[in-house]
Image (spheres, grey):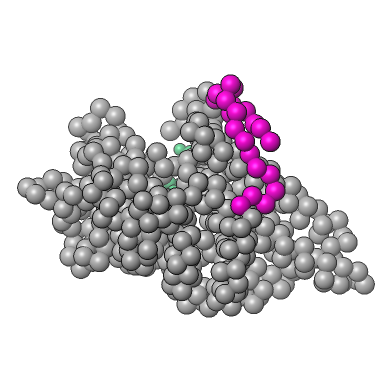
Amino acid sequence: MTVHSPETPEGEVTVALGEDYPDLRESVRRICKDFPSEYWRKLDEARAYPTEFVQAMTASGFLGALIPEEYGGSGLPLRAAAVILEEINACGCTASPVHAQMYIMGTLLRHGSDEQKRRYLPKIASGQLRLQAFGVTEPTTGSDTTQLRTRAEKRGNVYVVNGQKVWTSRALHSDLMLLLARTTPVDQVKKRTEGLSTFIIDLREARGHGMEIRPIKALINHNTTEVFFDNLEVPPENLIGEEGQGFRYILDGMNAERILVASECIGDGRWLLDKGVAYANQRRVFGRPIGQNQGVQFPLARAYAELEAADMMARRAAALFEAGKPCGPDANMAKLLASEATWHAAEAAMQTHGGFGFAQEYDVERKWREARIYQTAPISTNLVLAYLGQHVLGLPRSY
Ligand SMILES: Cc1cc2nc3c(=O)[nH]c(=O)nc-3n(C[C@H](O)[C@H](O)[C@H](O)COP(=O)(O)OP(=O)(O)OC[C@H]3O[C@@H](n4cnc5c(N)ncnc54)[C@H](O)[C@@H]3O)c2cc1C
C-alpha cells in the first residue's frame, strides 16, 4: 500500500499491512512463552525487575535490535523494533526495559563520538552493559524541560553535577544513564533550548560518590526512582556531542520514541482485547454468554477499531521515518491514538470481567494499570495536542 506524506505531497512511502516481520514475531513469541503471566504477577507483587526476561531478550539480540551490526547489534529498521515491542506486550509480557534501551541508545548512536560508540555500543549489544535509564524529568519543572535545574558546571577537568531528577526508571537496574543537565544558565543563552547537554553517567561509579537513587512506590511496576546529585564529578569524555546542544539531541530521538511507544501500546491493547473477548464468549450469565449483550460487545468492538486505526498510523509514521521524511505529526498522532485506544481496550476488558477483573490472578487489573501510563509518559497527551495545534494546525503557541 502506498500513502502520501502530508509534509511532502510528492513523496511516497510503502506501508506493509497484516503481520509484517512474521519470523521476528514468531521468535519473540517463542521467548515470551517462557515468561508466562505468573512470572509477571510475582514481579509486580515484589516490585522487582525482570532480570531473566531482559537477559533472554538480550541473548536473542532483541535489545540490540537498533544497534548497527558493526557495533555487534542486529541493525534492524525502526519498524522491526516496533514489531518486537508490540509482540512482547501482546504476549502479556512487559516491554518497557526493552524499549528504554532501544531509544536511549539512539542518542549515543546519532551524536556520540566514534570512541564513545566503540566503548559502549558493543557491550550494550552483548548485555555486558545496560543503558536503560534516562534522566530528564525533574520534580519542579515537569514537562517544561528547558527550565530543568540540574546543573553540570565545568570546573577544571571535570563537570560537577548538582540537582535532582524524578521518575528515572530502572536507575537501580542499569549500568549507565543518559542525563540531560544545564551547562549554561538559562539567562546566559539566546534561546532556552540552548545550554543543555547530554552526558553518559556510569551509575556503578556514581552511586555513593555524589549520586543517590531512591525507589518511588508507584501504580505500576516500572522500577522508577528519584536521583539526587550532590557534586557528582563527570569526566568530559562522558559528554555526548557538543556542549549546549543536548536538548536538540533529545528532540532528534523523539519521533523514534513516539513510534516505538505507540507499538508498545498497541501490543498491550491487543492482549487486553483478546482477554476481554475470550471472557465475553465464555462467561454465561442470564443463560447466555455476556458477549451477546451489546453493552458488553460494543466497547470491545470500538476498542478493536481504534487499535486498528492507531496501528495504521504507527506503520505510516515508521515508514516515513525509515524513508528519512518528516514524520513528527505522524509519530505524535500514532502515540496519541495508540495510548487512547489501549486505554479503551483496558477499560473494556476490565468492565467485561466484572468482579474478576479485580482479581490479580486474571492479570487484567495489572495490564489495566500498566495501560494507563502511556497517556502520561514519556509525554502527556496535552503536550502532544499542543504540538499538533501549534505545528500542524498553525494555532497560537499555548505555552
Ligand atoms: C511510571 C513513570 C515512569 C517514568 N519514567 C521516566 C524516565 O525514565 N525518565 C524521565 O525523564 N521521565 C520519566 N517519567 C516522567 C514523565 O515523562 C512525566 O511524568 C511526564 O512527562 C509529565 O511530566 P510531569 O509528571 O512533570 O507532569 P506536569 O508537567 O506537571 O503536567 C501535569 C499535567 O498538566 C498538563 N500540562 C502541563 N503543562 C501544560 C500545558 N502548557 N498545556 C496543557 N496541559 C499542560 C500535563 O499534560 C499533565 O496532564 C516517568 C513517569 C512515570 C509516571
Q: Quadrant of residue 388?
A: top right
Q: Nearer the viewer, residue 252 or 110?
A: 110
Q: Is residue 365 left or right of residue 122?
A: right
Do we see residue 222 in this rendering?
Answer: no
Q: Is residue 12 magenta?
A: yes
What is the residue that sits farthest to the front in this orientation?
70
- Depicted 192 relative to depicted 336: above or below: above
Q: Please state the extent of the stretch shown in magenta in the rendering.
A: 1-21
Which residue is pictured at 23% across the width and 31% down the height? 189
In the displayed structure, would residue 178 be above or below residue 352?
above
x then y, percent, for residue 257: 47, 46
Q: Position of residue 24 (x, y in %)?
A: 58, 57
Per the picture, the main secondary structure of the magenta-coloured stretch is loop
Q: Considering only vertical position in the picture, is 314 above or below 268?
A: above
Residue at figure coordinates x 62%, y 62% from the top left: 26
Residue 95 as seen in the image, left or right of residue 337: left
Provide residue 210's location: percent of width, then percent of height: 18, 62
Q: From where the camera sits, is residue 19 visible?
A: yes
